[in-house]
Amino acid sequence: MTIAGVQLRNPVIAASGTFGYGIEFDEILSLDKIGGFVVKGLSPESMSGNPTPRIIQTKAGMMNAIGLQNIGVRAFVQDTLPHIRAIKAVKNGTVAIANIFGFQIGDYLTVIRELNEAEGISAYELNASCPNTRHGGMVFGMDAGLLYELVYKCKLASTRPVIVKLSPNVTSIAQIARSAADAGADAVSLVNTFLSLAIDPETRRPRIANVTGGLSGPAIKPIAVRLVHEASRAVQIPVIGMGGISSAEDAVEFMLAGASAVQVGTASYTDPRAVENIATGLQKWCKEHNIARVSELTGKAEL
């Protein structure tokens, strides 16, 4: 199957921020059983992230405020990307996608230009949930105009397909998705985490040092499915769904709502082989339900 111009063996992808740089999982699961993986978000320079505690378990998932810790794009290209290229599964077609973020549009462009010169990456995923420091901290993905400018300039600079990862913390996901599509995005992925707060009743203080964090996991799945459905009705480009997927049936639900592919994130914390299990489970589910091509599921919910 092809998504955003990228050939995938199946529609199940490991989500950014939950799968390291991919190489950490090479001996844990069979990477050649999944469609691909998205590496941790990359910035122009290395970042140490937020102070701890920065991740907590919730009753139906987790909250995190990692702070986009990463080694920086130059170290990634020099030290990590050669190992990604050497992975047998990648040589055999498992796709590696680079997640990119920044606090100004120029940051995104710097990362893209560095990666353009390197081999081993099939597409870019823009994290649109970052605050734009040049516009008073307005998050790129919460303003249609800012998002359009970001995607348009990144698309011009890119030599690879551009996927835009959308925030759910917006009034109209349809409007935001259309803005990304109009600017030239090859696909959109959604949803990123929901802004959340947890307080310890004993200390009366936030459980996360950053005060707020992003909620993910099964708790957000029904909302994420609804947002994927709304986005898919608003754009003609592929939609990649995510948010609480922990089984093959969850993946099917997202695809019926309009997703062409899915990403699995938080489930990898409870089971490091979750992405592989969901991919093989989806294949089995399709066989049991006489689905010849998994793409036949996309948008076929009877609503």
Image (tube, rainbow, N blue to C red):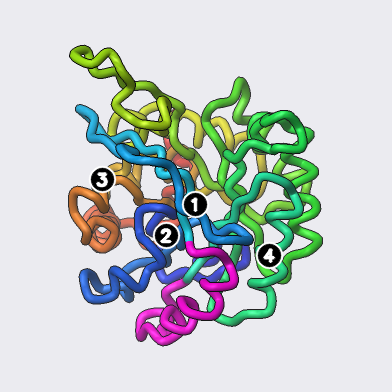
How far apart are labels 1 and 2 at the CA level?
Answer: 7 Å
Residue 82 is inside the magenta segment: yes
Q: Residue at the location (55% across, 76% down)?
A: 77
Does residue 110 appear to the left or right of 84 in the view shown? Answer: right
Where disc 2 sits, the SS reads loop
Residue depicted at x 50% and y 36%: 228
- Foreground: disc 1 or disc 3: 3
Q: Quadrant of the C terminus?
A: top left
Does residue 100 appear in the picture of this structure? Answer: yes
Q: Is residue 28 above or below residue 51?
A: below
Q: What residue type is disc 2 on?
A: Pro
Mark 4 vs mark 1: in front: 4
Q: Which mark is residue 206?
A: none
Q: According to the image, label 4 marks what residue? A: 112
Q: Is residue 154 above or below residue 168?
A: below
CB under 8 Å between callouts 1 and 2? Answer: yes
- Residue at left offset 45%, top offset 48%: 49
